[in-house]
Amino acid sequence: MYRISYAEISNDASSEIREQERQALDYAIELLSLAQMRGPSSAEATQAILYLQKLWGFLIKDLADPGNELADEVKGNLISIGLWVIKEADQIMHERSKNLSGLIDVTRTIRNGLQ
């Protein structure tokens, strides 16, 4: 019989969740890159922005959950970044900004940190 500890199962689950988050962020980067090529007023930009806002809404909700085991400082920093992303995406949606490259850079940095 195999003996698997709770810590091993928990680590496996955490790794799987991080991989899913990486994939979601990869998809956001793909959408944002296409939006950057087509322009901030394009249908692709709208699709990318809506996806990114929905993704960060989900991530912020997860980060704010009392069961989230990340350090409070890390959670606070990620929530602040997420709120900035949502706000900046809203500015692009309302044609007050064209900063798609900023959203791509931040999203890529967060994605790279999930390793």
Image (tube, rainbow, N blue to C red):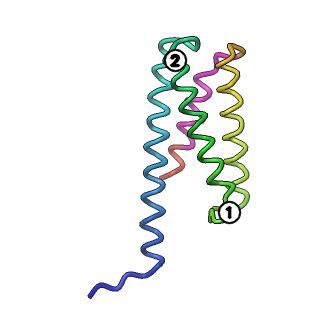
Q: What is the quadrant of residue 15 in the picture?
A: bottom left
Compared to residue 89, the image places residue 22 above or below, namely below
Label 1, secondary structure: give it: loop
Stretch of the chain drawn in magenta? 97-110
Q: Residue at x 49, y 40 (%)?
A: 25
Label 2, secondary structure: give it: helix
Residue 96 location (% of width, % of height): 72, 15
Left or right, 18 with respect to 87, comes to left
Q: Which residue is mark 2?
A: 36
Compared to residue 58, the image places residue 11 above or below, namely below
Outermost residue toward the left in this view: 1
Earlier along the polypeptide chain: callout 1 or callout 2?
A: 2
**Front residue (pair 82, 54):** 54
The N terminus, quarter of image = bottom left
Residue 80 location (% of width, % of height): 73, 43
Look at label 1 and name its amino acid: Ala
Can you tell which mark lies on residue 71?
A: 1
